[in-house]
Amino acid sequence: MSAALLAPASNTAWGGWEPPVEATTLVAASHGTNSPAGQAAIAGLVAAVALARPGTRVEPAFVDVQQPDVGAVLRAAGGRPRIVPLLLSAGFHTRHDLAGEAAAAPGTTLARALGPDPRLAAVLELRLRAAGLRRGDRVILACAGSTDPQGVRDCRITADLLASRLERPVEAAFVSAASPSLEEALGAAAARSARRWSRAGRVVVATYLLAPGHFAARVAGCGADVVSRPLLVPGEAVPSELVELVLERFDTL
């Protein structure tokens, strides 16, 4: 047999194992907000991630509203940056904005959004318990909403994950862009309560938003009996589940 036949084929032709590309900078890309509380909450998450991974360069970046923008951070990063979206589901920002920034910066990779993931459901449960969730309460998961069907599916998967933890139904509803709206879901819950007046429990809204801001304020004022706080609360310890999730997204493309 000739030496040529014994020689291994190249990885490209063979389709076999290729060594992973190890990212050198974690670009923590959030939406951005004018809310000082929201800014502090996101900054706390980024700081907690950097503290948990001292050998990794961690840089905050923003899709909108705040600076620095993602493109500027990528240009300054050099090496092989990886964008980790601090976003709870797929959508326009992940598929278009961040994907475009990654494509325009050679060597950059883009991780997937944080959700859906069972650890997010665990933090949602923590917030609901802190808000005083009771056995007979009905739970609505308030999500930001998206025109991207995958983003809507991601939120509904999270509702199912939370339902499994709480052992009760959880309905996903949306602040914008998708159905049912939070107002529609609350109206339907109120109608059910009117029909079952003596047995109806409270309507509790789980805030499926990463941090305080415009959408969180709308959820807080929705008129439900109880509304839990966002996943991140400024001035409180960052849930370890969120830090772990961000680092896992960075490590696994």
Image: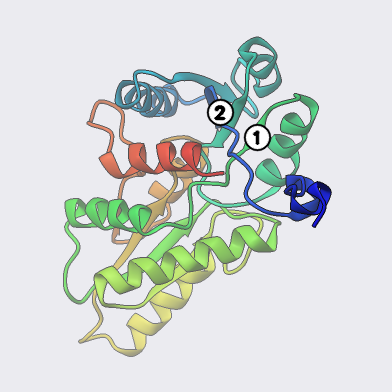
| Residue at horizontal 57 percent and vertical 22 percent from the top | 61
Is residue 25 something one can see in this rendering?
yes
From where the camera sits, is residue 202 visible?
Answer: no
The picture quadrant where one finds residue 85 is top right
Q: Quadrant of the C terminus?
A: top right
Q: What is the x, y in percent for residue 102?
A: 72, 31
Q: Position of residue 213 (x, y in %)?
A: 47, 35
Residue 18 in the image: x percent, y percent?
64, 44
What amino acid type is highlighted by mark number 2? Ala
Q: What count of labels does the image hold? A: 2
Look at 82% across and 52% down and name the residue there. 2
As shown in the figure, which amino acid type bears the numbered disc 1? Thr
Q: Residue at x 25, y 70 (%)?
A: 166
Give me the residue at 42% from left, 42% from top: 248
Circle 2 is placed at which residue position? 23
Task: From the viewer's side, name the closer residue of 197 and 143.
Answer: 143
| Quarter of the figure with residue 199 | bottom left
- Identify whether 23 is placed above or below 116: above
Compared to 157, does 115 lie above or below?
above
- Asked whether the residues under the numbered discs 1 and 2 touch, taking CB atoms below 8 Å apart as contact, a structural biologist would say yes
227 to 152, vertically: above or below: above
C-alpha separation, residue under disc 1 versus residue under disc 2? 8 Å
Picture disc at residue 109: 1
Q: How is the image coloured?
A: rainbow
| N-terminal label among 1 and 2 | 2
Q: Quick one: quadrant of the N terminus? A: bottom right
Mark 2 secondary-structure assignment: loop
Mark 1 Cα-neighbour bin, 10 Å: few <14, some 14–19, many ≥20: many
